[in-house]
Amino acid sequence: MADIEAEALIIGAGPVGLFAVFELGMAGVSAHVIDILPQAGGQCMELYPDKPIFDIPAHPRITGRELSERLLEQAAPFKPVFHFGEAAQTLQRGDDGFIVTTASGKRFSAKVVVVAAGGGAIVPKRPPLKGLDEYEGTSVYYAVRDRDAFRGRRIVVAGGGDSALDWAIDLAPIAEELTLLHRREEFRAAPASVERMRRMVEAGEMAFRLGQISGLVGENGRLRAVRVRHKGETFEIPADRLLLFFGLAGRLGPLETWGYEVKGGRIVVDTEAFETSIPGVFAIGDVCLYPGKLKLILSGFHEAALMAQKAVRYVHPERHHTFQHSTSSEIIAEKLHLKE
């Protein structure tokens, strides 16, 4: 397979990876972006597409979906090329930079590599239920991609964190019936959400049951009921949709073996340019580690800006590089057709 040539290869299409497209573009560097997920947005789209985020500068309140859409809009003038459903596997030195190979066999030749993989490959924690895989994607889900797909359904939402309560509250009004299932009375969710859930239960707008899932009842991927065990007793809750919110597991996987310094599952970087111990390979966002690191989207934005100023020196060493504000950038003016 011929190499796909890129000036910069960004691994991860979450908010920080998307902003890295913009910052690299501002420095005159084009980018290809790969992500194991089927769409851009990372955890913002996987975990809370419709949940408000409150600490994005100039946006007192913005949802994960809105943030992802606006970052894509901001990056669009620089024409990034996205490769979804691709998991980065190997990193090797190339003739003019690096060769990154994905699990599907795609090969990318890039002068610089930017790891913006968040917590790594994000996968849902799956309960040890017999035959679970038969129902996944048809009756059992770990996220809500299309809210209307649950309209008029008998839904069981299992879990005790923010995602479980938020979606139980959100879906209850459109469901035929909805039951929130948790193994204990205490929750790990925001107190306001817990209080609202309890009010809805009292009003008969949803049900709450204690217990743990012990099995699924149905056939050919079509769920009829969820079998539950509690204090030695077993009962069934009629359902044709099951949402499981038992948390997510993030792992670097093959990215941990690429040869840079890793501590506690995170990639060690400097704070001048967020470069790893391999010159030309950078790490930004939640995946990177340095003294005082905060796992905030806005911190990742700062890291992307400084990364781009160093990355351009590898990609275009022949050019004279000076930092430009966006208000006076010739590149921005050209991309947005602001030049007369």
Image: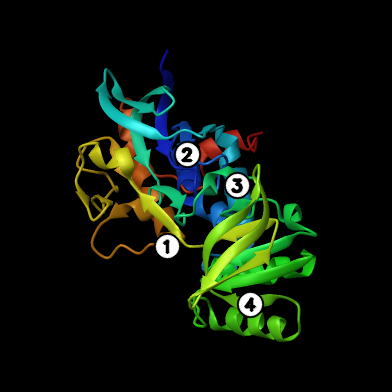
Q: Give residue 227's position: percent from left, percent from top.
A: 59, 63
Instruction: Tell me if residue 310 comes above or below residue 180 in the rendering.
Output: above
Amino acid beneath label 2: Ile
Task: State the residue at coordinates (48%, 37%).
Answer: 25
Amino acid beneath label 4: Phe
Residue 174 placement, left or right of 51 = right
Q: CA distance from mark 2 to mark 3?
A: 22 Å
Q: Earlier in the sequence, mark 2 or mark 1?
A: 2
In the rendered structure, are the residues bearing label 1 and label 3 in contact, judged by CB atoms less than 8 Å apart?
no
Q: CA distance from mark 1 to mark 3?
A: 35 Å
Amino acid beneath label 3: Tyr
Q: Residues within 10 Å of mark 4 (few under 14, many from 20)?
A: some
Residue bearing the label numbered 4: 208
Please tell me the numbered disc located at residue 296. 1
Amino acid beneath label 1: Leu
Q: Give residue 56's position: percent from left, percent from top.
A: 53, 64
Nearer to me, 152 or 317? 152
Q: CA distance from mark 1 to mark 4?
A: 34 Å
Which SS class for mark 2? loop
